[in-house]
Amino acid sequence: MSQKKSSVTKYLVLFGIICFPIAVWFLLLTGKNNYVPLPILGNYSVDSTLVNGKYKVDTIYPTIPDFTMTNQDGKTITQNEIKGKIYVTDFFFASCPSFCPKLTNGLKEVYDKFNKVDDFLIVSYTVDPDHDSVSVLKDYAKKYGAETNRWMFLRGDKKQIHDLSLSYLMIPPDTIKDKQQNIQHSPYYVLVDKEKHIRGIYDGTVPGMLDSLEGDITYLVRQYHKK
């Protein structure tokens, strides 16, 4: 009996050795104290300030600049309407025959999943303001069941849209021109936090990227709600 008991004990110890690191990994991944920080994207600068004889070093990350545009209801929209929000953005145009419908359908899934989160928003900028009038944007929003206070479709002058897309890291080196209409736009979603920092860029045409985006939104929401 003692030999049998000894063998059982050895197997239990071996089982524990194998399972313990797996259990620890699982708790770190899913537990309340798990922390897998998202990077802040873009070129940053370092600022040194002399305070009480010691240098204080701060990392300055790029932020999305202020803008003035018009939404699908004809209302003027600035950063004030987005302030304090986590948001996902994309650049599209309503008559796009290529990847825009796929991207917008992906955003519809995100919209349905996070529609009840008060500090989350979707912002879609048209790159074809000459044709995407307020009424066109309103019809486009209605097609996807988008409420204006949860999903904004914005139009502005072309230079502002181009400059703004640069701040979202959306134009060169990986710009795509639609062959049928030769309009410059990119198949990406961009995730922005409440401090206007870019936290993720996702190719909406690649399988699995939408899941990554939704996971990162969930992460940011949880981190802000812990504060």
Image: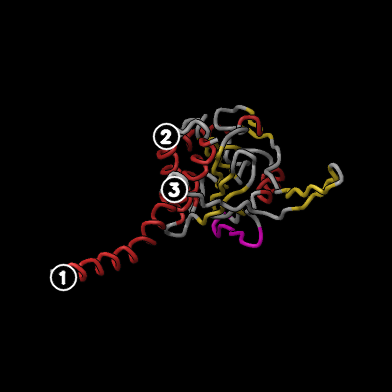
Q: Are marks 1 and 2 in contact (CB under 8 Å)?
A: no
Q: Which residue is mark 3?
A: 106
Q: CA distance from mark 3 to mark 1?
A: 59 Å
Q: Nearer the viewer, residue 30 or 189?
A: 30
Residue 128 is situated, as x and y percent measured from the top left of the image, at 60, 45
Residue at point 83% right, 47% down?
54
The label shown at residue 36 is none
Q: Secondary structure at mark 2?
A: loop
Q: Nearer the viewer, mark 1 or mark 2?
A: 1
Residue 98 is situated, as x and y percent measured from the top left of the image, at 49, 55
Do we see residue 219 in this rendering?
A: yes
Q: Nearer the viewer, mark 3 or mark 2?
A: 3
Q: Are marks 3 and 1 in contact (CB under 8 Å)?
A: no
Q: Which residue is mark 1?
A: 4
Segment tinted magenta in the rendering: 172-181
Asked whether, in this view, residue 142 is left or right of residue 127, the answer is left
Q: Secondary structure at mark 3?
A: helix
How many dots with numbers? 3
The label shown at residue 145 is 2
Q: How would you rate the neighbour count of disc 3 (Cα within 10 Å): few for under 14, some for 14-19, many for 20 or more?
A: some
Main SS of the magenta segment?
loop
Residue 187 is situated, as x and y percent measured from the top left of the image, at 53, 55
Q: Earlier in the sequence, mark 1 or mark 2?
A: 1
| Amino acid type, callout 3 | Gly
Asked whether, in this view, residue 47 is left or right of residue 130, the answer is right
